[in-house]
Amino acid sequence: MINFLIVANDAYIKYAKSLIYSIDQYHKDYQIFLYLINPMPKSVKLLSKKTKYNLNIRIIKKDLNQEIIDIYSEEAAYSANIRGKILKELVESEEIDNLTYIDADSLVRGPIEFNKNYDISFFVRPKRDSRKKTFYFSGLISVNINPLNKARLLNALNYFQERIEEYGLLKW
């Protein structure tokens, strides 16, 4: 079974629905942990009706500023930065042997092969903004969770979480 993690705020739920459908097209044995940040009740109701899909929906309610600061809102920054904390919580609490985080606005265009030879795999792409500053976007992060590497994985996720907290969950 492949375990997927998707994190979306209300603006990205429409994309997450397409992603869920595309996962189902290429995978029959899967589970999706869908974390929704401040969703509208109608969005949750609509997704809850998707019983065909193996969805584990979790709601995060957070008082966040919707005003655009720099180029993103606090909610957008929070939604992106919280994934490290969620990954850590899932690795610690769930009885799963793998987890693949995938951006809500992605589409699966073929089977995702989970390689058990790697502890962690990233797909990153660089993007330059108008200020010529380069950012790295990680649209896909896969982790292999076994007794040998769980402690190392948790150490790496702790380090990631500490850097996020150092700079702030609401900043880029």
Image (spheres, rainbow, N blue to C red):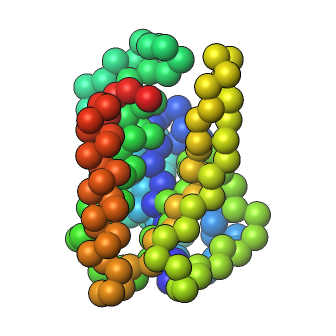
Between 44 and 133, the one nearer to me in the picture = 133
Numbered disc total: 0
Q: Is any part of residue 28 visible from this angle?
A: yes
Q: Place residue 44 in its image quadrant.
A: top left
Rendered residue at 68%/17% (across/down): 130
Q: Place residue 92 in its image quadrant.
A: bottom left
**Quadrant in which the C terminus is drawn:** top left
- Residue 150 image offset from top left, x and y in percent: 31, 77
Residue lying at the far right in this picture: please name it.
109
Between 167 and 51, the one nearer to me in the picture = 167
Left/right of residue 17 with respect to residue 60 in the rendered view:
right
- Residue 169 image offset from top left, x and y in percent: 32, 34
Q: Is residue 120 above or below residue 71?
A: below
- Residue 108 image offset from top left, x and y in percent: 69, 62
Rendered residue at 30%/49% (across/down): 161
- Residue 19 image offset from top left, x and y in percent: 63, 55
Q: Is residue 108 above or below residue 30?
A: above
Left/right of residue 81 with respect to residue 94 in the rendered view:
right
Q: Is residue 50 above or below residue 61?
A: below
Rendered residue at 57%/61% (across/down): 122
Q: Is residue 33 above or below residue 37?
A: below
Rendered residue at 67%/47% (across/down): 125
Q: Is any part of residue 59 visible from this angle?
A: no
Between 168 and 32, the one nearer to me in the picture = 168
Left/right of residue 140 with respect to residue 60 in the rendered view:
right
